[in-house]
């Protein structure tokens, strides 16, 4: 999707890509939050695109959407090299095996109408920041949200505020990353989101200050 195209209105028939860990984490609240997100998506008729693993938070959100909405509304994308380690038991929905992490992220982007991040590690942060950067530049206008479970992302959100205050993120670009503590509130924010002018569009109009390049 290019920056001048509007994303689909988030509702029944749409899909959200969920970035999350293949671990369950140290607290049962993380798995509970993943299940609650999947249940809320199913209640709204919103399908899932995820990393394809059937363990940890990946498995929890996939099972919740598959149980509530039907497995045909779940798409998992996984690189062949990770398939033996990440998938256990019976997978949910359609599993697409790709050659690389880059292909995985590109396919997840193409299939999704919005993105939600829940707790995870390096891979989760990589996916979240890359998709945010793509929007800042103007390659898409799809909403990006963080479900802040147990304050897990407090430090990340503080860092984004700090980077904005220090002049490395434009205030308009800081608004790309939405956050909430409940699935319903977060999806409502995503549905109401309007993307700010991108760096590419501002630069093409000569409106981008040298200090605003992020």
Image (spheres, grey):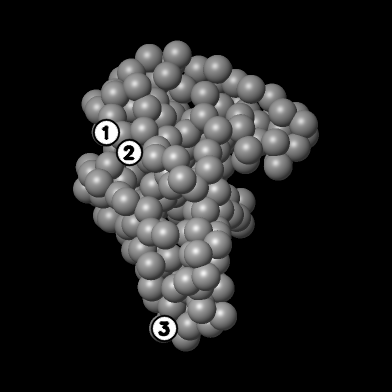
Q: Residue furthest bottom?
A: 166
User: Which residue, given by chain and number where applicable, does mark 1 sit on?
Assistant: 40
Location of mark 2 (residue): 37
The quarter of the picture where the C terminus appears is bottom right
Q: Earlier in the sequence, mark 3 or mark 2?
A: 2
> Within the image, what quadrant is residue 54 found in?
top right
Give percent across and percent down for residue 140.
Answer: 50, 46
The answer to whether the residues at label 1 and label 2 have Cβ atoms under 8 Å apart is yes
What residue lies at 56% left-to-right and 27% top-to-bottom? 76
Residue drawn at the location 60% of the way across and 21% of the way down: 95
Secondary element under disc 1, as helix, strand or loop, is: helix
Relative to 30, say whether 157 is above or below.
Answer: below
Which element type, helix, strand or loop, lies under badge 2? helix
In the displayed structure, would residue 91 be above or below residue 170?
A: above
Q: Residues within 10 Å of mark 2 (few under 14, many from 20)?
A: many
Viewer-proximal residue, 61 or 136? 136
Residue that appears at 61% across and 32% down: 107
Q: Is residue 82 visible?
A: no
**Residue 88's spot in the image, x, y percent?**
61, 26
Assign a secondary structure to mark 3.
Answer: helix
Give the alpha-carbon distance from disc 3 to disc 2, as whole Å. Answer: 32 Å
At 47% from the left edge and 85% from the top edge, which residue is drawn? 166
Out of 5 and 80, give the one closest to the viewer.
Answer: 5
- Residue 4, can we see it? yes
> x and y percent of residue 188 in the render?
23, 44
Q: Which residue is mark 3?
A: 165
What is the count of numbered marks?
Answer: 3
Q: State the CA–CA distance, disc 1 to disc 2.
A: 5 Å
Q: Nearer the viewer, residue 22 or 42?
A: 42
């Amino acid at each position: 999707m290019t920056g001048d195209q509007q994303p689909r209105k988030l509702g029944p028939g749409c899909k959200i890509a969920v970035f999350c860990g293949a671990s369950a984490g140290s607290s049962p609240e993380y798995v509970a939050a993943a299940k609650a997100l999947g249940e809320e998506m199913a209640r709204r008729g919103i399908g899932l695109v995820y990393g394809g693993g059937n363990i940890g938070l990946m498995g929890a959100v996939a099972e919740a959407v598959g149980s509530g909405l039907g497995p045909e509304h779940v798409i998992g994308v996984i690189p062949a090299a990770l398939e033996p380690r990440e998938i256990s038991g019976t997978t949910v929905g359609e599993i697409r095996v790709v050659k690389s992490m880059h292909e995985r992220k590109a396919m997840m982007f193409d299939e999704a109408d919005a993105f939600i991040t829940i707790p995870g590690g390096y891979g989760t942060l990589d996916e979240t920041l890359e998709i945010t950067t793509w929007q800042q530049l103007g390659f898409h206008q799809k909403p990006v949200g963080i479900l802040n479970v147990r304050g897990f992302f407090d430090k990340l959100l503080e860092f984004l505020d700090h980077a904005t205050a220090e002049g490395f993120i434009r205030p308009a670009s800081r608004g790309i990353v939405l956050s909430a503590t409940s699935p319903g509130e977060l999806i409502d924010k995503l549905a109401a989101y309007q993307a700010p002018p991108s760096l590419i569009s501002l630069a093409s109009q000569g409106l981008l200050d040298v200090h605003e390049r992020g």
